[in-house]
Amino acid sequence: MAIIEREDPLELEAGEITETAERPLGVFTRPQSNTGWRSWLFTVDHKRIGIMYGAAGIFFFIVGGIYALFIRLQLAVPNNNVLSADTYNQIFTMHGVVMVFLAAIPLGAAFANYLIPLQIGARDVAFPRLNAFSFWVFLGGGLFLMSSMFIGGWWENAPDGGWFAYAPNTGVLFSPSKGLDFFAIGLQITGIASLVGAINLIVTVLNMRSPGMTMMKMPVLTWMLLVVQFLLLFAMPVISVALFLLTFDRLFDANFFNVDQGADPLLWQHLFWIFGHPEVYVLILPSFGIISEIIPTFSRKPIFGYSFMVFSGIAIGFMGWGVWAHHMFASGIGPLSVAAFSVSTMFIAVPTGVKILNWLATMWGGRLRFTTPMLFATAVVAMFTVGGLSGVTHALAGPDTQQTDTYYIVAHFHYVIFGGIILGFFGGFYFWWPKVFGYFLGEKLGKANFWVMLIGFNLTFGPMHILGLQGMSRRIQTYSSGQGFELWNMVSTIGAFLIASATAMFVVNIVLSRRAFKAGKTPAPGPDPWDARSLEWMTASPVPEHNFDEVIVVERQDEFWHRKWGRDESGRVVRRATVEEVAHDGSNTNVHLPSPSYWPLVTAAGMPLVGYGLIYNLWLCVVGGLLILGGLYGWALEPADDPDAGHGHGHGHDDHDGDDDDGGEHHDGGDAGAEDADAEALAEVSTDG
Amino acid sequence: MADTAVAADTHEEHDPHATSLGMSHEKLGMWVFLGSDCLLFGGLISVYLLNKGRIGPDDIGPDEVFDIPFTSVSSFVLLMSSLTVVLAITALQRGDIRRNRIWLLTTALLGAIFVGGQVYEFTVFYREGLGYTTNLFGSSFFTLTGFHGVHVSVGIVMLMSMYLQSSRGKLGPAQSEKLEIIGLYWHFVDVVWIVIFTIVYLFPQ
């Protein structure tokens, strides 16, 4: 503890408010511990928040997967009665809502939170406490939505309107349970989380790049995640408006979707899809970014056509706003609208195709290493192409009227969402796992996981193309025998259970790999296990709390790669420096980090209370509202930076929890601690390595 | 630098060149948020435009309830508050704490007069027979203007919090950027009102 002198508060700049640091509301002291469960509840560290997003996302992915298994069980044979029609409606709705809003979005947010600051060489995000707030709001909203399963009876009050909840089907008249209230308010809450997170990450990328890291030197993943945040920024308020209208209709008898009063229910479809189509790109672009990191690394080539990759991502971001009505070709929007949206939808295949060609060109002639992450990344390219091609068949309005609301649509979007997004995320897990947790996931089980998942996925969703074109409708809980649906439905159900086994293998792999590493049977990955290219590999694994020991001055795209490798006179690639020479060892413990805080959690906890209050008892709203208000005031009065807090790993002045295991090794870093302990030291230009 | 002193969320406030764009995180964050808020009001205004004519022939509609002179006056009051918030900011930047407090209170008061006018207007409409559930026009009108009123109220709360900070001696020139950021929000809410006033009240029905 004594290595670092406490900063004298007087050294802070004039105008800095310090006296309220310890007890901002006169009651609570700030949270201090860096270990134990409290360190997670009150953390503002973008890495811990990213890990929590990932854990929550995987949890909801498994829950949503269990719903899917029940759907497939029900449909395995004709005239089945595993689920009643009413329960079936609730389960397929919950499957969609949970997978899109509670699994795919937070998994994207997990990669964004963890990797954006690292890839741009920053210490943290721009607003660390807001970041924690986003996560807790998301979790609160997600659990609020899930609680609809239990409240008022088992599967009585879950939403039952499908994930896009078309009006007027969602009015009290047609859906009298509380389900759609939970849907509307729950998504409103998670929407707040996405919006706040988007603002935070946009400011982070625009404002916190390390010296020399111009926009066109940023890794493709960071670029794609930035586009995603802009899409969320502008899409979330639109769904908010739609959800407000629905809530007001259901709770306060407003007339927005009341056809008796002359309302136009198409309004919901427009608002929903103006949000919903950009949302599709919110889901897919993180995965595009992830494989744009994996493929160059395991091809030992820079990404082919970097600027094309970036600009096609931006183009997708813009064009994503002009295609929403292709979800509504069967709604009677008129021939001119249909033609216009048909053409714009075909156009958006162009930037997507550019990306696919660039990934292939990156692999072309490269020295390929088919590790587990690379297998997943390659599968994304192939499977997404299948999904993209069936998507082009929907862009043609004629065939689309035949395909609408059949299993062909289900097949299409699962090829995009599962084949494009989920496989990409799994690739990302295997790729960054050693960076995040400091041990490899086993390759053997990983490859088995990949193949079972790929085969299961194609068995599940491939046959749905055929079923759909044969006329099997989605969202109907059963089908009669003799229509030719039996075989492919059974195949699809078997496939679904293969996917479930693959997911189980992933979980088992985590447990076994961790155990093997703790027992010393597998080597530590070191900072750069894959010979990778971007800045996150330039610091220790797992990443120390302060990210980088020194500010990194960036000169080139793929800066880290160029510090390791260069060319000799004859143009051959030769090693310039070893990883150990280039990478930071995490020994600098003198970095002043943002301090943990109670208020994000307190403020976020009020939101589900307001939600329950709106549905059941308005007094609860008062309690929730007071909690939010109190939380916000505590937050505003508390300085972001506790001047008395410790620096780096667990050196808080009253940190009686003691250091965690890796706290010790950072002391060995030696002289860094003896230097003048201030952040200014970090601002010094470093050309380390 | 004054405007980096409040950029306290990271250690880098010690370095004046810390932000890549040269603008503090807080201010950039507010601009980004306002961009998002445009879409919120864009959506609500679209809903209103779609629904305003969808009333029966004998139904109560905009022509029956709007009192343009009254709303013009309250709009003028709100627009003047944009001027006073600028005066409050410049006073604070000069270090003129007394004037800063006066203009802060004036701004909050003008905002409160506007919100009060809105409440009065809503009650009159209700007495004339236009409730929230009466028809599509009622639902759309009250939702759109209600959301705007909530935005103004949030602005008043922020201004009064600044005033409280000031009275505790914690609002000096070094914190003037905080007020500037609240000012951005305040101007935005005023601009949105110009759009709403024009579209809802002034366009022929």
Image (cartoon, coloured by chain):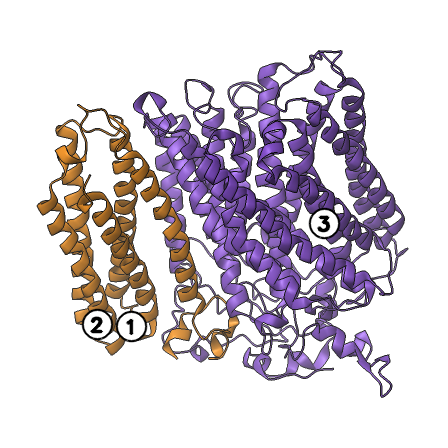
Where is mark 2, residue-wise?
B97
Residue A320 in the image: x percent, y percent? 54, 49
The CA span between labels 2 and 1 is 7 Å
Asked if residue A448 is positioned above or below residue A473 in the image, the reply reads below
Asked whether the viewer can see residue A687, the reply is yes
Give the image location of residue A423, x and y in percent.
Answer: 74, 46
Q: Residues within 10 Å of mark 2 (few under 14, many from 20)?
A: some
Q: Residue visible at 59% across and 50% down?
A: A348
Give the color of chain B as drawn.
orange
- When the figure is inspected, residue A59 is found, relative to residue A114, above or below; the finding is above
Per the image, label 1 sits on a secondary structure element best described as loop
Residue B163 percent across, percent down from the top left? 24, 61
Q: Is A98 situated left or right of A509 in this image?
A: left
Q: Chain of mark 1?
A: B
Badge 3 crowding class, 10 Å Cα cut-off, few under 14, some 14 to 19, many 20 or more, is many
Which amino acid does the dot numbered 1 rest on?
Gly
Q: Chain of mark 3?
A: A
Q: CA distance from mark 1 to mark 3?
A: 51 Å
A531 up-or-down from A334: above or below: below
Quarter of the figure that contains the N terminus of chain A: bottom right
- Can you give x and y, in whole percent of width and height, for residue A192 in the image? 46, 46
Amino acid beneath label 2: Ile
Q: Which mark is residue A167?
A: none
Q: Secondary structure at mark 2?
A: helix
Subunit ID for the residue under disc 2: B
User: What residue sits right under mark 3 in the picture?
Assistant: A424
Report which residue position mark 1 lands on. Answer: B172
- Work out whether residue A252 or residue A680 is closer to the camera in this orientation and state it: A252
- What residue is at 26 percent from the left and 58 percent from the top? B159
Rounded to the nearest angstrom, the CA distance separating label 3 from label 2 is 56 Å
> The C terminus of chain A is located in which quarter?
bottom right
Q: Is residue A168 above or below residue B69?
A: above
